[in-house]
Amino acid sequence: MSHVVIIGCGIVGATIAYELSLVKNLKITVIDRQPPAQASTGAALGVLMGVISQKIKGQAWRRRETSLQRYETLIPELEAITGRKIPFNRQGIVSLLGEEDNLARWENLAAVRQSQGWKLELWDTAKLKNYCPQIAIANITRAVYSPQDRQLNPTTLTLALAEAAQHNGVAGKFGVNVLGISPTNNSITVETTEGKIAADWVVISAGLGSTPLTAQLNQVVEIRPVLGQALQVRLEQPLGNLDFQPVVTGNDVHIVPVGGGNYWVGATVEFSSNGDEIPPSEELFQKVWHQAIAFCPDLAPAEIIRTWSGLRPRPEGRPAPVIEKLSGFTNVLLATAHYRNGVLLAPATAAAIREMIS
């Protein structure tokens, strides 16, 4: 029986742990220095922009398609095992377009998606106002509606994945630090604050923590932080049509309904100008909030009940994510640095890791 050690239990590591728990003859241990669903996962908005993305071919599209398809079966599967209710918005995404947006590009994307068996609708402002009366259309020329894209709660999902994985026999070691990784003959020794673990496979899925782990094996994968800030607001009643509450997005600002007149709004994209320190920018935070109000003036009187920020792991000098064998090793796998698409691509990442190990 092969022993797989997964380092990191955010959304990606937890999904890998659960999917591998469905494979026979694997012993699985997942290690994290924190409880599940912390770091970038705990700060994510969970908007699954797959069909509406401009990725139309190759691996980038296949991963999105694989993940969207898996989520439709994964959510009810996890709810049945754990008894947890996982918030999963199936009402799609409405993307607002302005004069600067290339309409022909969106028309082409809609045609491509139709040929691939997916739906995208182009709305004029009258149709937008009919479906989403809360939107101020003064500077909006069109909208794109993606009914098959989704939004979910990343924290609730990750906790359910971790619980279901442990239900299937996965050993969870949380609050445990990895002190070292070293190859020994045909296996790898993972040294932790709870002792040494002999593994046949090691999966590094530790986000920003992946860089020091790869450094221990003399194959440094540079991953840099990108800060994102978001907020949760509360209104006395939901915006627009009560029976149609999609995610609304425009200018890279998301307005995400999370039930009961509550909305998440985000997120900023803030890069480091000096090392890895990124102090949150109040100016960028206000810019996101004011853009959301410009799209939806009814947000203005909302009560801000929570603000937060998180660091997204972005690979240096190469596209995200990093899903591959670590150079020089056949049994050390990387599943990390998803940047802004960790929640979206988690199922496809788990499928890729499962295939490598199988």
Image (cartoon, helix red, strand yellow):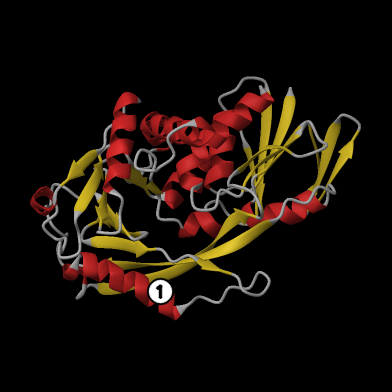
Residue 226 coordinates in the image, percent (x, y): 56, 63
Q: Residue 307: percent from the left, percent from the top?
A: 40, 71
Is 271 located above or below residue 152 in the figure?
Answer: below
Question: Can the viewer see residue 200 in this picture?
Answer: yes
Residue 15 appears left or right of 318: left
Front residue of 132 and 12: 132
Q: Is residue 128 left or right of residue 264?
A: left
Residue located farthest toward the bottom when viewing the structure as drawn: 282
Residue 349 as seen in the image, left or right of residue 154 = right
The residue closer to the viewer here, 149 or 61, is: 61
Residue 206 located left or right of residue 43: right
Quarter holding residue 288 = bottom left
Q: Amino acid at mark 1?
A: Phe
The spot of residue 248 in percent (x, y) is 26, 54
Q: Residue at x 58, y 47 (%)?
A: 320
Quadrant where the C terminus sits is top right
Question: Based on the displayed image, in which of its 4 quarters is residue 304 positioned?
Answer: bottom left
Q: Residue 326 appears at what percent x and percent y?
A: 75, 39
Residue at the image point whose x is 49% and y is 53% from the top = 340
Label 1 Cα neighbours within 10 Å, binned few <14 / some 14-19 / many ≥20: many
The one of 191 and 346 positioned closer to us in this rendering: 346
Residue, x 38% and y 29% (percent of image)? 73
On-image quarter of the N terminus = top right
Q: How many marks?
A: 1
Q: Is residue 144 above or below residue 236?
A: above
The part of the image, by quadrant, that contains residue 254 is bottom left
Along the line of sight, which residue is nearer the eye, 314 or 98?
98
Pointer 1: what residue?
Answer: 285
Q: Determine the residue located farthest toward the right in the rendered image.
A: 185
Residue under the image location 21 percent in, 74 percent down: 300
Per the image, label 1 sits on a secondary structure element best described as helix
| Residue 166 visible (yes or no) | no
